[in-house]
Amino acid sequence: MCNYAAAERVDTESIVSSVRDALARQAHYDALGISPFGNMFDVSEVPTEARDAIFDMAAKTDADIFSCESRPETLSGALIEETVDRLKGKRLFVNLGLETANPWVQAHCVGKSLSTESYRSATSSLREHGAFPVSNILLGAPFLTEEEAIESTVGTIRWALANGSHLCVLFPSNVKGWTLQEWLWERDIYRVPSLWSLVETLRRLGPEMTRSVALSWYSASPTDPHRLDQVSDPLRDAPTTCPRCRDTVIRSLDAFNAGAGFGVITGLAEVDCACKKAWAERVAAQTVTADPLDSRVLTAYDRIGTELLGTAWWDRQRAKVRSELEFSYDGSVVPR
Ligand SMILES: [Zn+2]
């Protein structure tokens, strides 16, 4: 779903100078987020000298909080300790791209390798050194029904908060160009979740859990519905409701994100709009008509295998992929 594909090669000096230029645009910062697309602590992405220089520059700003992204495997106790020292008293938030805590959904719907063990070890190591682990969590992985997507995300947020996460950032999925998700969307195999599913996810989490949840990527730009406020790339599709209630929903989600509390979500759950009724009916109908998830995934893989990778290749791989899907699936989308 992420279109972080080909980019020009950059060297240490150009990485450092681009950060220096960006920082010079503003004199004051409350919080500062500086990160490459993937992994701040992977030296093949950010060489050590560039990383050190970036942390030193960040330390000189007046921001209270510094955040970056990382895969859990590249974090070590020593590296975290060194980073906390370099930041000279700023609070360090490290975002881990968990997406889902269900290993089957992680492997076969998101297509990502991330072990829950390395996640646990990263969160405990961050906490041990006074840093704050943040989990990025996805709503709307491919092949899940909307009900499964909601349940899977609710279960994942509960799991993440019980396994060391200080905060969860919830991302409702969208469709970016040049992604496999776009290819599926063009063929009606993928559909972005409704913002009502985002509201329902928060409602099921309840007032206690949602205190540790922030939202991202839920609001398309008012001037261009194919751009998200926080994302520069044009989008093919993004979560929404209907034109009649959209402003109300977005304003309420903005208020929730600004700390207005669970009352906002209760208020949204009581909004009466035709699009919400249609959403509820669609979610219910999908739950009744959908095949079991493993066979649904295999059907989609059949199309991807045949149309994108070629019949000859797919014919050789299909039996193996099919057995992987069947034997590892326990019927659940919620982490155990
Ligand atoms: Zn509506």
Image: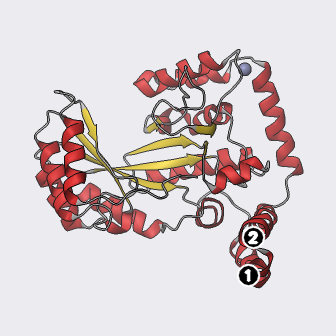
Could you give the CA–CA distance between mark 1 and mark 2, rounded to whole angstroms? Answer: 9 Å
Q: Quadrant of residue 301?
A: bottom right
Locate residue 147, reporting x and y percent: 73, 45
Q: Residue at x 68, y 34 (%)?
A: 194
User: Closer to the N terminus: mark 1 or mark 2?
Assistant: 2
Q: Which mark is residue 305?
A: 2
Query: Could you say whether the residue bearing mark 1 is in a helix, strand or loop?
Result: helix
Q: Is residue 276 visible?
A: yes
Residue type at mark 1: give it: Gln
Callouts 1 and 2 close, C-beta under 8 Å = yes
Count residues near mark 2 (Cα–Cα under 10 Å), then give few for <14, some for 14-19, many for 20+: some
Q: Which mark is residue 23?
A: none
Image check: 89 left or right of 276? left
- For label 1, the residue is 317
Task: Tally the numbered discs.
Answer: 2
Q: Residue at x 70, y 78 (%)?
A: 324
Q: Residue at x 82, y 47 (%)?
A: 287
Q: Is residue 320 above or below residue 281?
A: below
Query: Could you say whether the residue bearing mark 2 is in a helix, strand or loop?
Result: helix
